[in-house]
Image: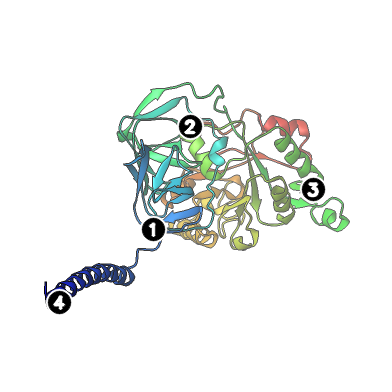
């Protein structure tokens, strides 16, 4: 073979090999450039506490497969613990669920009101066969879960039932579930709730205070402490006004309970301080033209209406002459609105001088008030019960000569 032919063959081989090397390099090069120009999406990193920004799908795991099993709505708080195959494990639901990281953002730790744990659960359950939709207090959808559920009823509300779910009360629509009898508790609903009526407080260790508060409706620090000790040591529950109304309406069941109320607004600071110390709930009925409701804020004190300027005697011909018995309707309505607005909204009322009539009640109802308290109850069986008239609620007036025997009898 001629030399030129051998050279040609060698050159052709070198060319072919070079082409193959170039093509391989070109493939890797363009792969590198493409990957560099289009990087992978960054891995989602979340804290253990998140909140949903939109609807989020819930998944359950079955044989390493993640199956769609429900959803949560916007603004629902979740706690997470670890991640598996890009699915975050949810730890604050009833069973093991997973979510993807989208539509979630880090959140502060959220705790829910657990006062319902004091309620006596009904011996009935809601039952669902294939789907459970859960709503919050304002009827916003929170969770939609696939599967069968049987859950005890804590609240029987209008057209809905309140059940315990992930340490809070959520609601199911009555027409979406069946109800069955179920033995959930041996505890029974209290047969009646005593309501205490205080007015003024003073420190009996301070002579000036003792001399200034010299009416029989002045409670000394020593007397009030004895009362609060009795309530605390005997495990009485102190319902809010909303809980009391729900109890009257048969919507919830309560253990032995006592309602603490205070009238007017004069000399109440000591009483509020002691309620905070004992962590017991009470309601102050304030005369809003005399005292600024904003001065009495406390996590253990509700503020409600004792009228704005109807706590003057001699207006009407009966009793001490409280104006709510006979003033023109528009005058009363304006007074009630003024009082409620100053408080920041109230539908609970306390009659000035404990005086009322059918006319008073009708105007209160027109104004949107749902509870009204009287006073001067003196019999141990005069308790607030399921079905009590919500506009004639009795109270036991505490005076400086109320004995501990009297007090114990008031609580039933």
Task: Give neighbour class at mark 1: few <14, some 14-19, many 20+ (Cα, 10 Å).
Answer: some
User: Which residue is identified by label 1?
Assistant: 53
Q: Secondary structure at mark 1?
A: loop
Position of 409 relative to 400 (above/below): above
Identify the secondary structure beneath mark 4: helix
**Left or right: 220 as drawn, with respect to 28:** right
Query: Horizontal and vertical percent for residue 141?
Result: 35, 47
- Kindly identify the residue that appears in the image at 34 percent across and 46 percent down: 71
Question: Could you give the CA–CA distance between mark 1 and mark 2, rounded to whole angstroms?
Answer: 43 Å
**The label number, if any, that marks residue 221 in the structure image:** 3
Tag shown at residue 3: 4
Residue 209 visible, this orientation: yes
Residue density around tag 2, few if under 14, some if 14–19, many if 20 or more, within 10 Å: few
Going from N to C along the chain, the mark reached first, 1 or 2, is 1
Front disc: 3 or 4: 4
Q: Residues within 10 Å of mark 3 (few under 14, many from 20)?
A: some
Between 123 and 18, which is closer to the camera in this rendering?
18
State the image coordinates of residue 81 (x, y, percent, origin top left): 50, 47
């Amino acid at each position: 073979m001629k030399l030129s032919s051998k050279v040609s063959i060698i050159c052709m081989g070198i060319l072919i090999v070079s082409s193959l090397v170039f093509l391989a390099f070109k493939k890797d090069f363009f792969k590198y450039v493409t990957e560099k120009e289009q990087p992978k999406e960054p891995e989602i990193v979340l804290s253990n506490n998140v909140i949903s920004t939109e609807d989020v799908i819930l998944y359950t795991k079955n044989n390493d497969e993640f199956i769609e099993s429900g959803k949560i709505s916007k603004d629902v708080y979740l706690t997470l613990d670890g991640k598996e195959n890009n699915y975050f494990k949810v730890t604050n639901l009833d069973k093991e669920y997973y979510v993807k990281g989208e539509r979630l953002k880090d959140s502060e730790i959220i705790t829910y009101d657990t006062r319902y744990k004091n309620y006596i659960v009904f011996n009935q359950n809601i039952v669902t066969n294939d789907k459970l939709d859960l709503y919050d207090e304002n009827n916003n959808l929170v969770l939609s879960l696939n599967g069968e559920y049987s859950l005890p009823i804590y609240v029987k509300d209008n057209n809905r039932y309140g059940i315990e779910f992930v340490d809070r009360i959520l609601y199911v629509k009555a027409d979406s579930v069946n109800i069955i009898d179920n033995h959930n508790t041996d505890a029974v609903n209290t047969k009646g709730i005593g309501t205490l009526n205080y007015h003024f407080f003073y420190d009996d260790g301070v002579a000036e205070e003792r001399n200034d508060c010299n009416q029989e409706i002045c409670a000394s620090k020593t007397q009030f402490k004895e009362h609060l000790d009795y309530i605390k040591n005997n495990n009485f529950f102190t319902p809010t006004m909303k809980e009391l109304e729900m109890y009257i309406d048969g919507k919830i069941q309560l253990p032995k309970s006592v309602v603490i109320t205070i009238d007017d607004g004069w000399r109440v600071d000591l009483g509020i301080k002691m309620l905070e110390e004992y962590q017991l709930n009470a309601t102050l009925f304030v005369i809003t033209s005399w005292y600024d409701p904003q001065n009495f804020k406390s996590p253990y004190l509700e503020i409600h209406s004792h009228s704005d300027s109807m706590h003057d005697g001699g207006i009407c011909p009966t009793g001490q002459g409280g104006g709510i018995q006979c003033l023109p309707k528009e005058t009363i309505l304006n007074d009630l609105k003024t009082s409620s607005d100053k408080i920041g909204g109230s539908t609970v009322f306390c009659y000035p001088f404990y005086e009322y009539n059918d006319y008073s009640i009708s105007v209160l109802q027109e104004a949107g008030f749902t509870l009204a308290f009287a006073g001067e109850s003196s019999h141990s069986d005069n308790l607030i019960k399921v079905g009590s008239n919500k506009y004639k609620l009795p109270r036991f007036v505490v005076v400086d000569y109320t004995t501990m025997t009297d007090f114990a009898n008031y609580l039933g």
